[in-house]
Amino acid sequence: MRSAGTVAELVQRQWGDHRPGLRHEDIVLSHHQVASGAAARAALLADLLPAGSEPHVGVLLDNTPEFPLWLSAAALAGAAVAGINPTRRGAELARDITHTECRVLITERTHLPLLDGLELPGVRVLVTDTEAYAARLAPYAGAQPGDTVLTRPGPGTRMLLYFTSGSTGAPKAAVCTQGRLAAAGQSLVGHFGIGREDVHYICMPMFHGNAVIADWAPALAGGAAVALRRRFSASGFLADVRAHGATYFTYVGRAVQYLLATPERPDDREHPLRIGFGTEAGAVDAARFRERFGVRLVEGYGSSEGGAAIQRTPDTPQGAIGRASDRDDLAVVDPETGRERVAAVFDEDGKLLNGAAAIGELVNRGRTPFEGYWRNEEADAARVRGGWYWTGDLFFRDPDGFLYFAGRTEDRLRVDSENLAAAMIENILARWADAAAVAVYAVPDPVAGDQVMAALALRDGARFDPAAFAAFLRDQTDLGTKMAPRFVRIVHSMPVTATNKVHRVGLRREGFWSGSAVWWRDPEGAYVLFGEERLASLAGEFEAHGRTELLSSDAGRA
């Protein structure tokens, strides 16, 4: 079958295909029904959008059938979907909708309270799980793909406006065209051998690029079915996989750790799942996942904005993501000077020995497919500087050119004038048998720079043993002298964002004291409870060096 240049073409191919194409709880729609439903919604959208307005529709939904139906409808109509994050609130939520110039907002009853009192001038709201919505849609039931277009779909037609998360400032809406999304889906079909018999389990939120680009798009391109989970559930994961016959899923952030934290069962390997594709699982947890569930996890990398991609090859070493794709000229550089970093040096066990010299920011020095942010020239300029695309991600490269992920630039720490990557420390701490999840982040040093704090969520039944933890750290030969956590915070569960990434912003805001147990490493390397007396002493040190404003000691106290 020839490759498709647009998502609209892929949706049209579903017409006449009566195999199961969309599963959700007790609902099963055929591929043909999906294409028919998309055509009806495209026609409705054309009638609802005011003349002269941008062809943008906001979707404020959990993972229900209406989400992929409206994605498909937008593709057919030549419109763009802005995925609206339901964890946003108040003025921030209103800003996301109005910034992307959505004149139609698709939502459901469970999210209606979020819209109470918001200023959304000119925005028409459709509530999908109501009789009024069904009645409004009914007149368009006979529509076919291609009947109604707002803009004739082409490879350069806007398809997605999806918000990228950030630690500061308002989220930026990255543009993804139909051509780029169709190409991404078809590339993954070839990479993973996706076929018509596969079922893609979508449990990551569809307002985020991962679920749409890495899960829905390849299913559409390969003729596979999709099975939706309203929201990610670690306890419901395997039951869903078995019920829907799922063979493929994607993950982001800490989802894998939460799956590993569920109680082990003798039937953990009894399921049809064959592969998981995502980011930030970590080599230790990926190995644990394969051993327990018999499923290979493939760590991938493609910046959300499309500016750089790394391809995995059969000879990719363990822990590496792959090499630069043929279209990219990728380099690992010093973020301040732009000079290329030295190649990584490993010991016989594969542990990185020269992280301070090897880790830098990944840049694309070649032609970038980055399509910009919606109405944000300042962000565009920050992303593309000096003709290079700056990913904002930290990597290191081995002598053979294989690239290894080392975290986000915003998660760098500067300890005693040495730059550290949080992800590298996390990968080491993840080896500790009692750790279910780990997050490393910076807290301010009283004199200058940062100190290392680690938040640990423990496995069921485990208790924090400070002496055992200190002994574990001493045994890690690749743990640099500046990398050992000065503070260790024990959390019941790791706080995460709506996309299952660690909520480091919240952790940093809580500072040194949050009401949960915090341990401090003394000069001898032992961990002792960080109590009121030590906190008062630390406050005095900050005051003595004129850095009192950085000590957020009361941020998390009850």
Image (spheres, helix red, strand yellow):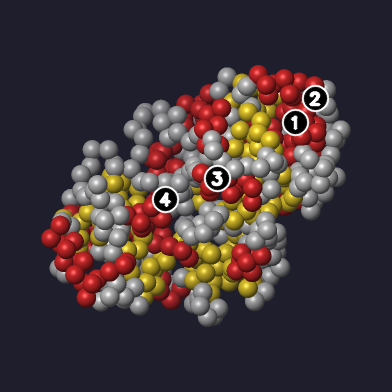
Q: Earlier in the sequence, mark 1 or mark 3?
A: 1
Residue carrying label 4: 502
Residue at image x 45%, y 33%? 233
* Residue at x 76%, y 21% (from the top left corner): 138
Judging depth in this view, the residue of 202 and 445 nearest the camera is 445
Q: Quick check: marks 2 and 1 in contact, CB under 8 Å?
A: yes
When the figure is inspected, residue 242 is found, relative to residue 423, above or below; the finding is above
Q: CA distance from mark 2 to mark 3?
A: 31 Å
Of 116 and 26, which appears nearest the observer?
116
Amino acid carrying mark 1 in the image = Arg
**Which of marks 4 and 3 precedes in the sequence?**
3
Residue 282 x %, y %: 43, 53
Residue 527 on image: x %, y %: 17, 59
Task: Estimate the spatial distance between the alpha carbons at disc 1 and disc 3, rounded to whole Å.
Answer: 24 Å
The residue that label 1 is drawn on is 41
Classify residue 287 as left or right of residue 372. left
- The quadrant of the rendering that contains the N terminus is top right
The residue beneath circle 3 is 93
Residue 449 seen in this snapshot: yes
